[in-house]
Structures are given as C-alpha cells and as structure tokens.
Amino acid sequence: MFGRLFKKFFLATLAAVIFCSLNFCEAAKKTIAVMPLQNVSGYSDQRVAEIMTEQLIVAIHSSGGYTVVERAQMGTVMREQGFQNIASDPNKVAEMGKLSGADYSLVGKLTMAIIGDNPTAKTASTIGNMFGLGQIGQMADGFVKKFKSRVQMEIRFVDNTTGEIIIAKTIEGTKTGTTQLEALNEACQDAAENFLKELDSVNPFRARIAEISGEDVYIDRGSLDGLRKGETLVVAREGAPIVVNGKVVAVKQTVVGKIKVTEVNSDYAVCKKESGEIHKGDVVKRS
C-alpha cells in the first residue's frame, strides 16, 4: 500500500514539475508581433509582401528564442483599432504591439522585389546539345536554377514597453530558383535569416562549455536563448583582460575550435566537436 501511494505521489510530483517547467519556458520567451509588410517595391503581384511577412514569421518562430503573435490575432487587433497601414505610422507600432500582448513589434516595407534570369546558369539542355545528348539535357533542364531574385525591406524592431527602436535597417536577400516563385520564396527566406542575424547582434548568443563527456559537449544555454539544432558555433578561449583608463572593458578571446548543436533543451544543449582543442569553461558564440 505504501509503495503504491509513494509511486502515485512521485508521478504526480514529476508531472507538476514538468508542467511548471514547460510553462516557465513559454513564459520566459519574448513575444514578437510581426506587422504585415507594405509593398512599395513596384512589383505587380501584391503577394510578394505576404510571402516576405510569412518568411519572417517562420524564421522568428523557428529560431526557438521567441514566440510570434498569430497572424489572425494580429489582423483582428489591427481591424478593431483601424490600423490599416501601420507601416506609414510608426508612432503607432508600440501601441499596436501592446494591444496584441507582444514584447516587441516588427514593422516595415518591402522596397524591392526583382526576379530575372540567372546570368550564371547554363541550362542542362544547352550543355546536353553540345555533347549530342539533347533529350537527357531537356529532362534535366527542370532542375537548373534559371531564375534569380533579389528582395529588400526596410524594417523597424521596436520595444513595446519603452517605444525604443532597437533595429532600424535595410535588409536584403538574394537567391536563385528553378521557377520564378521558387526564386522569390528563397530570396525572402534569405532576407528573413539576415534579419535574425541582426536580432542576434542586438542580443548576442553567449554560452560556456559546462562539461565534456566523450564526444558530447554540454553548453549552458538552450532554446530559451534562441539556440537551434544543427547550428555550428565558435569556441573561444579567454585570455588577458583589456584595460582602458584603469577599467576592464573586455577580455581577449582566441578562437580554438567549432562545435555543432545536436540536441537542444530549454536551458542547455548537447554538441559535437567539429574542430580544434576545446576545454571546459571555454566561451561559445555564433560566428
């Protein structure tokens, strides 16, 4: 009897701990409201702004460090408040973000969208014909990236609590594709990834190697800090402090190796060494 009661108590306690941990993880993540981008690029298909907005949402959500206000919820708030074109009224951005329950807001304009022939692509059919393999060349032609797309957006990333503009920048993306739509999607994804790099520069990822066990390298940061499985991180070793006017302003760091993230938890991650000689206590950062 006592054994069964203890088992039930243990399982209930474990479930409560897991539930609290999961809720803590979600609560600890900052929320971003991504406003629909305005298309001022001159590109005729208005869906290009929707594609760019969606790629931003996907990139931010996939980063693991933030949650994103759902588009349906965002649209409802905008309609209720009469904010049809918030990109032209940046003073409303923080107010809008607060109403959606977000910590930060991302607002902007798509200023360029170009799709043309990829000048570096030599079609498979042309190459095939040169060697008398026209039919094979035509079959492979569908896999050649014939088109090249370039997009550009002007964005503002705003702290909804203070109203401070944290990032105000023009961000570009350029990619190729087998079709025009594929090239456009890839370019928008590239621009979204470049935005994440800007976001990381404002709140840079820093961790330390907590333990090394065989091939496994444990670091003391995880998904709550935006870390993603598959990322390659730089390992650096700290040296002498840098002193200016009697104050330590930085510490010299020497890159000693690289590690790749193989498993991500909320507050720690497991990595594999890719190169170099790394030690417990070394600093880990994005390249």
Image (spheres, grey):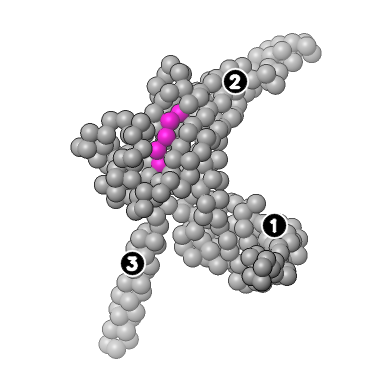
The reply to whether dot 3 and dot 2 touch (C-beta < 8 Å) is no
Work out whether 46 lies above or below 57.
above
* Residue 213 % position (x, y): 65, 71
Magenta: main secondary structure: strand
Q: How many numbered tags mark residues here?
A: 3
**Element class at badge 3:** helix
Q: Is 146 left, or right, of 199 in this rendering?
A: right
Q: What element carries label 1?
A: strand
Amino acid carrying mark 1 in the image: Lys
Position above or below: 257 against 188? below
Residue 263: horizontal and vertical position, in percent? 55, 59
Q: Mark 3 points at which residue?
A: 19
Amino acid type, mark 2: Phe
The image shows residue 77 at horizontal and vertical percentages of 24, 40
Q: Closest to the observer: 47 or 123?
A: 47
Query: Which circle marks residue 147 in the picture?
Result: 2
Q: Earlier in the sequence, mark 2 or mark 1?
A: 2
Name the quadrant containing residue 21. Answer: bottom left
Magenta highlight range: 106-110
Q: Position of residue 243 (x, y in %)?
A: 69, 68
Q: Nearer the viewer, residue 196 or 221?
A: 196
Find the distance from the CA under tag 3 to the CA under tag 2. 49 Å
* Nearer mark to the viewer, of 3 and 2: 2
Please identify the quarter of the rendering in which residue 88 is found: top left
Label 3 CA crowd tier, 10 Å (few <14, some 14–19, many 20+): few
Residue that appears at 54% across and 21% down: 114
Report the Cα–Cα distance between label 2 and label 1.
35 Å
Quadrant of the snapshot with the N terminus: bottom left
Query: Label 1: which residue?
Result: 258
Mark yes or no: residue 206 visible: yes
Which element carries disc 2, helix, strand or loop?
Answer: strand
